[in-house]
Every structure is written in C-alpha cells, then in structure tokens.
Image (cartoon, grey):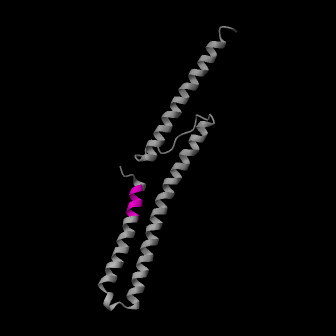
Amino acid sequence: MITPSSFRLRLAGSFCLVIVSICFINLAVKLDSISLADLLGLGLSLVFGSILALLLAWLAERDHALSVRRIEAVVTDLAEGQLDVSVPFLKGKGEIGRLAQAVEQWRQKALICRCEMIELAAACAGPSA
C-alpha cells in the first residue's frame, strides 16, 4: 500500500527522472548543433529539477518525521506511567495512523490493567484492616 509520504517521495523521484530524461533527450537531438545557450539551458533545467525533487522529498520526510516524533513522545510518556495523554493522528489512514491506533490500544489496556491493580490492591488490603 502506498502511503501519502511514500507517494510524495516517489513523485519527487519520478519528477527528477523525467527532468533528467528530457535534458538528455534534448541533448541527443541537438548534439550536432548544440550551442552554449542550449547547454546552459539543459544544465539549469537539470539543476532546477534536482533541487525541486530534493525539496519535495525533504518536505515529505520532514512531515513523516514530525509525526513519528509526536507519537514517540506519547509512547515515552506512557512508558513513564502517564496514561492520561492523548495519542495524535488517530484518524490517520497510513502507517502513522495505524501506529497511533496501536499506541492508543496499548494505552487503553494499560488503563484497564492499572484499574484492575488498584482494585486488587484494595481487595487485598481491605479484609486485613
């Protein structure tokens, strides 16, 4: 399944390949009569396409990394015993959404276990008091 971030990365890579292909096809067609202006135009289009593709890939990965960091912070809070945190991206449909849903299930089960432990401790302490 292609997620939005991997789709953007593939789109950026495909765009870069298309730009490079156009440059080389243009160069091959004009090989016998290539001028300095044509060569400069090809070089500029190659540089522009590469920069644009890298920018798109960076934006996609930055978005993905921010999502992972926010979920990581929630998991760290849960590991420290803070079960009242809210899990972000629960409505997400990609792997980040599935990860958030798994973390939320873990949080819900931890809340249930904590309640059962409190009830068990109260039941054990109750008759002897």
Q: Which residue occupies 36% across, 78% down?
A: 23
Could you tell me residue 2's position as x and y percent? 36, 52
Is 62 on the left-hand or right-hand side of 17?
A: right
Question: 1 or 125, which is in the foreground?
Answer: 1
Could you tell me residue 56's position as x and y percent? 45, 64
Inspect the magenta stretch and tell me whether residue 42 lies in it.
no
Q: Quadrant of the C terminus?
A: top right
- Work out whether residue 1 can be spotted: yes
Could you tell me residue 72's position as x and y percent? 56, 45
Q: Provide the residue span drawn in magenta.
A: 6-12
Q: Which residue occupies 41% across, 78% down?
A: 45
**For the view shown, which residue lies furthest in the left direction?**
29
Could you tell me residue 54's position as x and y percent? 47, 67
Q: Which residue occupies 32% across, 91% down?
A: 33
- Work out whether residue 90 can be spotted: no
Image height of 118 relative to 87, above or below: above
Q: Which residue occupies 43% across, 68% down?
A: 53
Is 54 on the left-hand or right-hand side of 116?
A: left
Looking at the magenta stretch, what is its main secondary structure?
helix
**For the view shown, which residue lies furthest in the right direction?**
129
Asked which quadrant contains residue 118, the reply is top right
Image height of 57 relative to 29, above or below: above
